[in-house]
Image (spheres, rainbow, N blue to C red):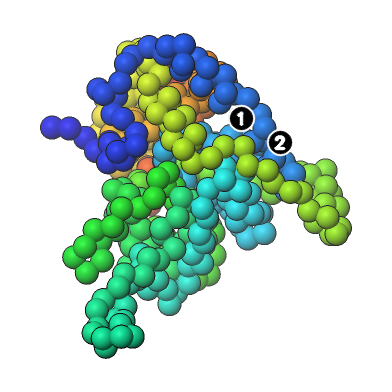
Amino acid sequence: MSWYDPLRTSPSVPHPSDVTTSPDANDLALLERLAGARTELSRQIAQRIVGQAHVVDDLVTALLAGGHAVLVGVPGLAKTLLVQTVSQALDLSFSRVQFTPDLMPSDITGTELMEEEPGTGKRAFRFAPGPVFGNMVLADEINRAPPKTQAALLQAMQERTVTVAGRTYELPRPFFVLATQNPVEQEGTYPLPEAQLDRFMFELNIGYPTREEEEQIVLSTTGDTQGTIKPVLGGEELLQLQRLVRRLPAPPSLVSYAVKLVRSTRPDDVEATAKVKKYVSWGAGPRASQYLVLGAKARAAMDGRAMPDLDDVRSVAQAVLRHRMVLNFQAEADGVPASSLIEFPAA
């Protein structure tokens, strides 16, 4: 039995069994290029986004690993602006879907229209692509739409295809869904189904800025100038870097550590801690182990390193695991967040 591979369905990104296990001279040059691009990318984004450096790093990590991300935070924290800025800095086609209670699935995927040829009068159906046909798709306030519409993204996120009226259409490469989500306690929100949450590689929590950062935000946004974003990477180069991340070797000890960490979130597993047994109904699945390793590889590549280490796994663990743990009523009653239940096992 083989588990779902989040990038196996993309013809542009090879499977680990298809690639070599050690970087060659070209790969080392790409690593150097990536490390430089990361610095320049951060500089470009900083022209519009004040602070949130860790969120930017996590977002770039997800893009290099070929994964999707959901950004969680109250309104007004520049979640949408961050995604727009990243798409401009990466020179990718960008589309935005504003999720509302009356949004229909066809408003996302596209629909078939009846058209009449001017000369012959013959009628035929023509597929009109929806906003999901972009390199970077912003699903803005995704939890404001009902579950049926949220589910319209599932096939696109998993298979990078869309099926309409029995026909399947390939989505452009690279393809990312970056969703923003308001806290579920707010009025008019629908919790995302666990099946859809699991398809997001990262959940990134955006908090309030510091006092100094907020003063800088006010100064920069109430003037008459705005930073101009210059593209740092194009789509084809980004695909090359995604393939590079996949080629980086993962030591067996790192894979073993990632699997052990994921299994420790499952209450019925021998690796589970006492807190997990008390507060968790369901833990993370095998997809989390895959994303921990991919995220660690992307982190190493961003630093110009040819091999990830355990610190790289730990650096992405919260973003990978917290939205994959289903807490029970006791956790809700005691006010215990999932992030507090993630403990790093001994190496």
Residue 136 vertical position relative to residue 269 in the rendered view, above or below: below
Q: Residue at x 36, y 58 (%)?
A: 153
Q: Residue at x 69, y 46 (%)?
A: 229
Residue 132 screen position, x and y as percent: 41, 59
Q: Under tag 1, what secondary structure? A: helix
Question: Which residue in the protein does label 2 denote?
Answer: 43
Q: CA distance from mark 1 to mark 2?
A: 10 Å
Q: Position of residue 54 (x, y in %)?
A: 62, 35
Percent x, y of residue 276 = 37, 35
**Residue 122 relative to residue 156: left or right:** left
Report if residue 325 is visible in the image.
Answer: yes
Label drawn at residue 37: 1
Q: Nearer the viewer, residue 283 or 115?
A: 115
Which residue does the image show at 61% across and 30% down from the upper left?
38
Does any portion of residue 260 appear in the rendered image? no
Label 1, residues with CA under 10 Å away: few <14, some 14-19, many ≥20: some
- Kindly give the residue lying farthest to the bottom in the view shown: 121
Mark 2 lies on a secondary structure that is helix
| Dot 1 and dot 2 residues touching (CB under 8 Å) | no
- Mark 2 burial class by Cα count in 10 Å: few <14, some 14-19, many 20+: some
In the image, what residue occupies the spot 83% across and 43% down? Answer: 212
Give the side of residue 108 with respect to residue 162, left or right.
right
Q: Which residue in the rendered view is the most extreme toward the front?
A: 119
Three-letter code, disc 2:
Arg
Left or right of residue 99: residue 283: left
Name the one closer to the observer, 210 or 199.
199
Q: Quadrant of the N terminus?
A: top left
Give the number of callouts: 2
Q: Nearer the viewer, mark 1 or mark 2?
A: 1
Q: Position of residue 42 (x, y in %)?
A: 66, 35
The mark that comes first in sequence, 1 or 2, is 1
